[in-house]
Amino acid sequence: MLARSLVFHVGDEISGWGRLVRAPTGDWFDPPLADPLIGYGPEGRPPPRPSSYGVPVDGADFDAVEARYERDGAIDGFAKIYGVWLADRISIHRQSTERVESVFPRWSDPPCERPPGGWPHGMNGRQVDNLEFDVGDLEDTGAAVTTVIFRPSDDQAVLVVAATDIAAVEAQLRSQLPDRLCVVPSRWTRAQLDQAQEHLLASWDQWGIYGSGPRCDEQAQATMTATLVRVTDEIADWIDTQPDGLVGLEPCGQGRSRPTPGHAAESAHARADVRAGGLRGRNGDEFGYGVQSVFPCTRSPDSRGERHDRYVQDASVRLLLTSGGVSNTSIHNALLDLLGKPITDSSALCIPTAEYGHPLCTPASAWRFITGQSPAPMCDLGWKSVGVLELTALPSIGKERWVPWVCEADVVLVDGGDATYLCHWMRQSGLADLLPSLPETVWVGMSAGSMVLTPRIGDDFVEWPSAPDDRTLGVVDFSIFPHLGHELMPENTMAEAERWAAEIAAPAYAIDDQTAIKVTDGTVEVVSEGHWKLFPS
């Protein structure tokens, strides 16, 4: 099994992008976990500290890191490191601030023979095709393992289903999508994928895993993939017991052994196979431009992906409500689907206003958000253009000036902070009243930027002293508990979320920073590579 080639041993050269931390306990290298914008105590952001995933390092240069933060002698920042593995630590010999960018291929060729005349163009008078269909109980019975939309072109969409019961899928969907359906045999059953996921969850702490979930390839075949600090012999041993391709690994640290003479070509070939052959598994939504997973490959470890139509008000704007920004491939591709075109062709407006209502946010943190230097990806995704819309300024300049800016934007990126303060200025500025007239605009919220659209946020999340209560806009009918289980917010446990939800006494989601809630056309869809839970009432 090619997982073995991802294991590194003493003396191997390694590299990885992540967070360098200098603390009283020494210097550390952490995976690039998202940094929340809310949740710190009255003393403000605490001194940096390593997470439980941290690996000791020697030779780190803390003057050569991105987004450097220092307090009480502790320092952190982000960097790409190159070094040598020394059994229990990394000796760094070079580092840079060059970000490791994810590659998002565009899956455009459904793995089925085209119908006569090719795949149809357009649907329901829309240029960009968003399919409408009902899968019934196909997911619950396991007949449909993955369900993914491929896009041969901007106005073409084909539903590709990897199925264990092809006849059942054909019977349910063919009449709804006679020439837009591609059904292929699934390589795995849902039970196999779920069993692999259960083992990864049981080994979470021991193996240094910080994310897991199904990923799909260009044939719509799923791989249960774990993101983790590094691959050990123990992990590779377990992978060897699994069917080839069922489990994939995405390590933060990449190793490169020093091959002995005669084995260099063999080692290079093995590494190439690992990257091309599926062990670095792709997400079911990772199909680049405009691809959508309806019952996504990215469902919660303890709850299947769901669409909750009853939890939506009449909101015309399309919503992507996140806890930690566009933090993974699934959320990235949900965004692409909402946009209906590449990010490089899309113009954005960013709203930092919520930061100023939270006592722990600063002008520096607002600047990092605007300039794309926040660990939570939002403004740095490669937009055609990015402008700043400061809501506190809008009442003084007149709607005739700023409304066209909003109407012309493809997406609005809304930062975290205090949701009640953001709600106040959305109403005062008139932006809240404008939302129903923006059917083609995508709203991407992060933390408070998502919570502001809910009916209530709960007293625990109110930090603005002038807030009359915890009520917000109520664009959707559910509330959000963000940053579930975050390393830097140990109080944000599932038990605490359950207590909070009981006080809300209405539908609510607890979501971590690897989860988003997508709302479009009256449908709520959870997109996740992490953990989440729905509290129905």
Image: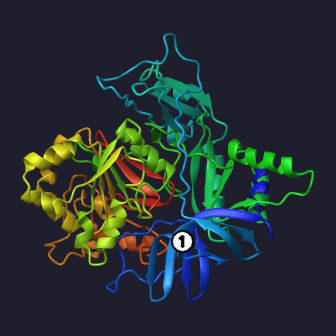
x, y percent for residue 11: 80, 69
Q: Is residue 47 left or right of residue 338?
A: right
Q: Is 331 rendered above or below residue 375?
A: above
**Residue at point 45% right, 37% down?**
289
x, y percent for residue 356: 23, 71
Q: Is residue 125 left or right of residue 203?
A: left
x, y percent for residue 38: 34, 72
425 and 294: which one is in front?
A: 425
The amino acid at mark 1 is Ala
Q: Is 45 rendered above or below residue 338?
A: below
Determine the image quadrant of residue 290: top left
Q: Quadrant of the C terminus?
A: bottom left
Q: Is residue 269 left or right of residue 185?
A: right
**Residue at point 67% right, 67% down?**
207
**Residue at point 48% right, 48% down?**
330
Q: Is 13 rendered above or below residue 361?
A: above
Q: Residues within 10 Å of mark 1 (few under 14, many from 20)?
A: some
Determine the image quadrant of residue 239: bottom right
| Circle 1: element type | loop
What residue did someone put label 1 on?
64
